[in-house]
Image (cartoon, rainbow, N blue to C red):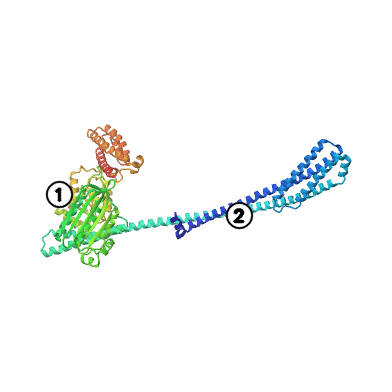
Amino acid sequence: MRNALFTLLKSPDHRLERRIVLALLLGLALTFVIHFFSSTSIRHLLASDEKVMFNFALDNALEDLDHQLISLESNLRSYIISDADGLLAEIGSNMAAARTKMDMITEMVTSIPGQPAGVGRLDDLLTKKNDFTEAVLDSFSRNGEEAAIALINTQEGLRLRDSIIRITSELRQLERQNITQTIELNRNEAQEVSRIDYMSTLLAATMVLLAIFFFLRAIEYRKTIQSKLEEARLEAERSAGIKEQFLANMSHEIRTPLHAMLSFSEILSDTRLDSKQKECLEGILRSGENLDTLVNDILDFSKMEAGMVQLERIPFRLEDIWSHLELIFTPRAQARNLHLSFEYLSGTGSIILGDPTRLQQILINLISNAIKFTETGGVQIVGYLRRDAGKQQVLEVRVSDSGIGIPEDKIDAIFERFRQGDTTTSRRFGGTGLGLAIVKHLIELQGGQIHCHSLLDQGTTFTFRIPYDTAGPEETLNNTIPAKLSTPEPLAGGRILLAEDNRLNRQILSMHLKDWGYDFDLAENGLEALSLAGRFNYDMILLDIQMPGLDGYQVARQIREKGALSIPIVAITANSGTQEKKKCLAAGMNDCLQKPFRKKDLLQLLQQHGQAADNASDRVILPPETKPPGAILIDYDYLASITKGKRERRQEMANLFLEQAPREYADLKKAVSRQNYEELATLAHNMQSTVAYMGMAQSLGDTLRRLEAQARQETAPQRAPELLQYLGNQLQQAVEAIRRELLSH
């Protein structure tokens, strides 16, 4: 709260918000002021009302006193003349009432600041009046009527009465003036309150209008800012796209000639050479490999800077990576007379979920540096897993060497880009200073940490830790580590389509394929490749990605759309990274080969996918109107809606589908083999419900509807077998997608 208030008061970006708050605070202050004046005015009006009531009460008391005195005088005269006992009682009552009124008047006047003059005299006159009345009554009772009348005729009683009435009249006149003044004051007070109310209402309305104005300005300002931010976002996306395209183009333009240089050198190394030629060729190969490493570092770092690095989450085994790295680095260490040790500690055989490619990249960088900066001694790599909370395990790896070491004051700087231990390091050993920056970024991207301990001239130890999830029993291990290669046998009656626009690359690949005894056709662009693929049956297609006319992605999609579902298609690309491989797979390709590749890499792919081609079932060429298995087989939004986002429910449905769908497909095949098309139509109709609840109503469901329509034709359906084969291919892809997307995490 305090930080928010400080930001509001100090930040220049919140001027409109400050104005809105100020207007609201002023409105609040005005409300308090209005309340204060209103309360004061109400108190004044209440006090004035009390004063008016008091004045009326005093006036009434004075008037009642006059009435009692007049009645007293009249009753006294009547009593003397008539000697009626009832009048004597009334005379006593008049005297008592007059005294009571006088006491009330005296008490009321006493509470008035600066009590009016004449009240004390009024009290004296009333006392004398009562004394005179008693004297008349006493004279009447003792001396008779004449004596009493003689006393009355002295006019003393009338004089006293008139004096009292005169004083009460003056007092009543004074009270009436007070009442008039009070009423006038109340009228003025009410007018003042009305003016204050009017002004306060006007000011409050002004404050509210100002607040609304500033609020609308803030909304308009925010919309403007949001519009600018959206423009900036779109511009950033365009810039990122341009940068990505630039990186792709640069990668292609650099890696293509580099690939040619390395491949021709490799081909040349298989020929007879004298010692000098071999020495020169080894220099070319080393320079090419160094250039390849440099290009990889620069492009990887550029992708990291652009935020385009994404991680895979697949099951893998550390022991496989260890074996692969040992296979790679043992010859390098032996060439430098270094001892290389890979230690497997407890837990390294476990299957974990993560990105093995990035882990391998980290280790290759660290081990390459360790070998490069070590002249005597050796390099030791130790790795083990320790269980953490839940299903997670933490991989800890130490890469130690006995090399030149790093000065203590330079250790923190080595993880910065373009930085090495000191200025002599790059001159002596080469390199860009990007390797460790890339390593640190990749480790932190996976939620890990890296530390370095080093002593100058004694060696360096890099220790990093990365958390991984433990693979469950449903995750299947996809071993991507190459096996030991042997020269492949040519595909039995096989034929390869090679599509490559670069003449040197075509020449290199042609030489390799000829050496291995493959039959192949060449295409110089995407259109030519598509034409050849439509005219001939191939056992494998090698597609360059960047070709004029149609690129490799477009060619692969169109080949799949024409129904060639089982032909292995391998991309040849200069773009590196797992995202490029995913893009190729999404386009319908089976694998990708990244330039610059070595002869053994191509050999590995030919062995892997050539065997797959040998074992593939008969190819199915579907008519153009029949859609192939696309990238979107399963409607995951539909699945999420019917399972309400519950993972357990989704997995339960997936397991049920994996159990039921293959049985129903087997029944379809039996119906086709028996040519029982009525049963086929019924089974196809029933299976539509099975695929629909798994979100495949628009993919497998469409094929089943076509199959049902074919089976219900009066004549023998000619396309039922090929539709069934097509459905089988779709079902296989769907099963793989379910296991990968729904049951692997």
Question: Is 69 in front, or is 617?
Answer: 69
| Residue placed under numbered mark 1 in the picture | 490
Question: Residue reaching furthest right?
Answer: 146
Q: Above or below — where is 662 with respect to 16?
A: above
Tag 1 secondary structure: loop
Q: Does the rendering let one see residue 612?
A: yes
Question: Is 136 in front, or is 199?
Answer: 136
Question: Is 404 in front, or is 260?
Answer: 404
Q: What is the crowding at mark 1: few (fewer than 14 residues within 10 Å), some, or many (at least 20)?
A: some
Q: List x then y, in percent, for residue 669.
A: 23, 36
In front of the other: label 1 or label 2?
Answer: 2
Q: List x then y, in percent, for residue 180.
A: 72, 51
Marked residue nearer the N-terminal end (1 or 2)? 2
Q: Which quarter of the figure is the C terminus placed in?
A: top left
Question: Residue reaching furthest front?
Answer: 142
Report whether 138 appears left or right of 651: right
The amino acid at mark 1 is Pro
Distance from the alpha carbon under mark 1 to that under mark 2: 101 Å
Q: What is the crowding at mark 2: few (fewer than 14 residues within 10 Å), some, or many (at least 20)?
A: few
Q: Which quarter of the figure is the N terminus placed in?
A: bottom left
* Residue 199, disc: 2
The amino acid at mark 2 is Met
Q: List x then y, in percent, for residue 407.
A: 24, 64
Tag 2 secondary structure: helix
Q: List x then y, in percent, for residue 339.
A: 15, 58
